[in-house]
Image (spheres, rainbow, N blue to C red):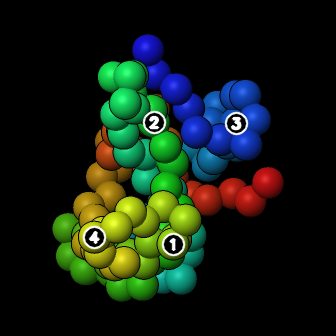
Amino acid sequence: MTKWHGKKEGFGDCVAEIQQFSAPLVNEELLEKILEVLFSYAEPDGTEQLVWCKEEVIGVQKNNNVHIQWDKEYLHEGDAPATRERLLKTRYNKNTPGAWRMYISD
């Protein structure tokens, strides 16, 4: 069974519905934009929890790669505060780990 992390029931689906239809281009226009990436975490009881983690784009490279600065709320001990991620069009606004979308404040 999968649990969703959000402020209220169904939060993930509501945000997905208001995303633009197709993935934004991965270029300089994403600089300083806030994105979310979906990660899967295992709970102590073995259930999977999907969590949309917030990040800011701080650099753009070739082949859909971006440098991101993670929101401190989502960092665990030993996690790097900034990483390189690949934003694939095929994973835009999906409900599977590795998916990504634009952050929309509530």
Rendering coords of residue 29 (x, y %):
50, 79
Q: Which residue is mark 2?
A: 50
Answer above or below: position of 37 versus 97.
below
Q: Which residue is mark 1?
A: 72
What's the CA distance linking mark 3 and mark 4?
Answer: 29 Å
**Which circle, 1 or 3, is nearer the viewer?**
1
Q: Secondary structure at mark 2?
A: strand
Name the residue nearer the viewer: 33 or 78. 78
Q: Residue furthest front?
A: 44
Kindly identify the amino acid type of the residue bearing the numbered disc 1. Answer: Lys
Rendering coords of residue 94 (x, y %):
45, 36
Q: Secondary structure at mark 1?
A: helix
Q: Which residue is mark 4?
A: 78
Disc 4 or 2, which lies upstream in sequence? 2
Name the residue nearer the viewer: 91 or 52. 52
Q: Give me the residue at 69% from left, 57% from top.
A: 104
Kindly indicate whether the residue at mark 3 contacts the one at mark 2 (C-beta within 8 angstroms): no
Answer above or below: position of 47 versus 40.
above
* Quadrant of residue 99 within the rendered picture: top left
Rendering coords of residue 6 (x, y %):
65, 41
What's the CA distance linking mark 2 and mark 3?
Answer: 12 Å
